[in-house]
Amino acid sequence: MTASEAKALVYRKLHVEEAEAAALSSLLDRLEYLPLAITQAIAFMSENECGVAEYFDLLTKSEDESIKLLSTELEDGRRYSQIAHSVINTWRLSIDLIKEREPRATELLSVMCFLNRQSIPRPLLLGEEDDGVDFTKALAPLKALRFIVTDKSGQGFAMHRLVQLSTKAWLAAHDETEVYKERALETVSEAFPLGEHKNRALCQQLLPHAEAVLTYELNDGSSSACRTKLLGNISRFYSERGQYKSVFTLEKEIYEKTVKEKGEEHPSTLLAMGNLAATYSDLGEAQEAKKLKVQVLELRKKILGEEHPDTLLAMGNLAKTNSDLGKAQEAKKLKVQVLELKKIPSKKHPDTF
């Protein structure tokens, strides 16, 4: 903004004493006439009945703190790579205030900044212990201090990119970045359902947030389990939509992670291997699918025995791939084995038919 535009904005929103005109000019210059920073300052002053001169003193009080806030997190800020310390400090003051008055609000903001910053659905943020009143109270300071905006339905939230970056910087200064990355991942993992057709709308709504949290590299064991679960549910969603290349990328990661963490013979590894093989089939790469399906079958025979239902399922899957490859005799041998072995529990069992 120009200086006159910035002053007009302040005078529309805030009563400024004549004696503070000089302080206002200094403040606007300090905020580099950035509208979002100015409205944030106005919100803070309104919320706390704070004068312009007093706010300017708070803003310029601790240069060391604002330098800390300019962490490496901010360096990929595209449009805001050269943000002045004082502009970041504008948000620091408000976050400190929120944490003092309503700690739950700070927790919500901290999770939100690691999600996609747009169209954050209300149900995603509601914890098990939140009821309507508690959640509304937690959101109040975030709205009052202009950290988030609500959509027309009241069921979705968004934040400006600079607010997101400033919150990340604040968390970095308090050594809490990893904590809230993990919490964001856990939040989305719990909310994202199995990608079945009946869950299509919810999956589509949560997908941008899932893609955001999956970019974080976390080493914690529980985070790894959450990531694997989320990858699996998204994979099913992509599969329902026929996006098999996307499915392959996810299933390959699940398989590699599971082998590394649980070993080649773990049931979870065999399941992941089978899913990856099925994806190869969906992509028309039958030879690659067959290699994995042979491994799955041999391992299931070894671990579970030849008559176990999972072994018979693997045998049937391999038979199907042989058919796809035009190897009808090999397919027939396997299918005969499956049929004979399924008769062992009962000739009248539905699976036998």
Image (cartoon, rainbow, N blue to C red):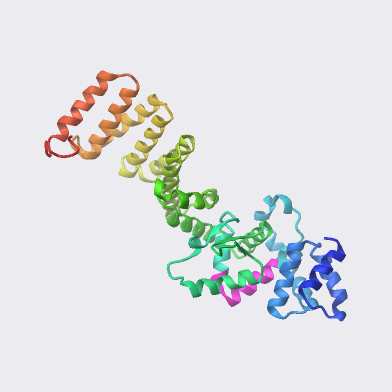
Residue 322 percent location from the top left of the image: 31, 23
Q: Is residue 350 left or right of residue 61?
A: left
Quadrant for residue 101, please give it: bottom right
Up the image or down, 1 lies above or below 77; here it is below
Up the image or down, 291 lies above or below 164; here it is above
Q: Nearer the viewer, residue 233 or 240?
A: 240
- Magenta highlight on residue 94: yes
Q: Nearer the viewer, residue 301 or 47?
A: 47
Predominant secondary structure in magenta? helix
Which image quadrant: the C terminus? Answer: top left
Give the residue drawn at x 44%, y 56%. 191
Q: Is residue 36 left or right of residue 277?
A: right
Residue 4 percent location from the top left of the image: 87, 65
Give the residue drawn at x 44%, y 51%. 224
Give the residue drawn at x 57%, y 70%. 139
The magenta region covers 91-105
Quick check: can you spot residue 97?
Answer: yes
Q: Nearer the viewer, residue 275 or 159?
A: 159
Give the residue drawn at x 46%, y 53%. 202
